[in-house]
Image (tube, grey):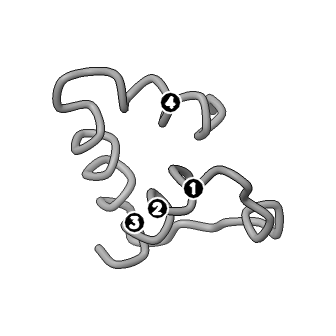
Amino acid sequence: MPDREEVWANAKHKTGGREKFLRKYAAFKILMFDEGLLDLSDESLRSMLFELIER
């Protein structure tokens, strides 16, 4: 599986890529995150994670 950070960075720069990324990951019934996400230094990644959780 590609690194989510890399996929997110690429998606942000494409037209409609951000929404497509969020729809794709929000469609899963269960998403598992490890403790590595607790120490996100990138505000963009934190925002993406919180938006996924809200969906």
Q: Is residue 46 left or right of residue 55?
A: right
Q: Which residue is mark 1?
A: 43
Q: Residue furthest bottom?
A: 54
Earlier in the chain: of badge 1 and badge 4, it is 4
Do the CB atoms of the residues marked 1 and 3 lie less than 8 Å apart?
no
Which of the 4 image quarters holds residue 13? top left
Q: CA distance from mark 1 to mark 3?
A: 14 Å
What label sits on residue 47 in the rendered view? 2
Do the CB atoms of the residues marked 2 and 3 lie less than 8 Å apart?
no
Q: How many marks?
A: 4
Name the element at disc 3. helix
Q: Residue furthest left?
A: 16
- Kind of residue at badge 4: Ala
Q: CA distance from mark 1 to mark 4?
A: 12 Å
Q: Which-is-in-front pick, marks 2 and 3?
A: 2
Q: Residues within 10 Å of mark 4 (few under 14, many from 20)?
A: some
Q: Which-is-in-front pick, marks 4 and 3?
A: 4
- Kind of residue at badge 3: Leu
Name the element at disc 1. helix
Q: CA distance from mark 4 to mark 2?
A: 13 Å
Q: Which residue is mark 4?
A: 9
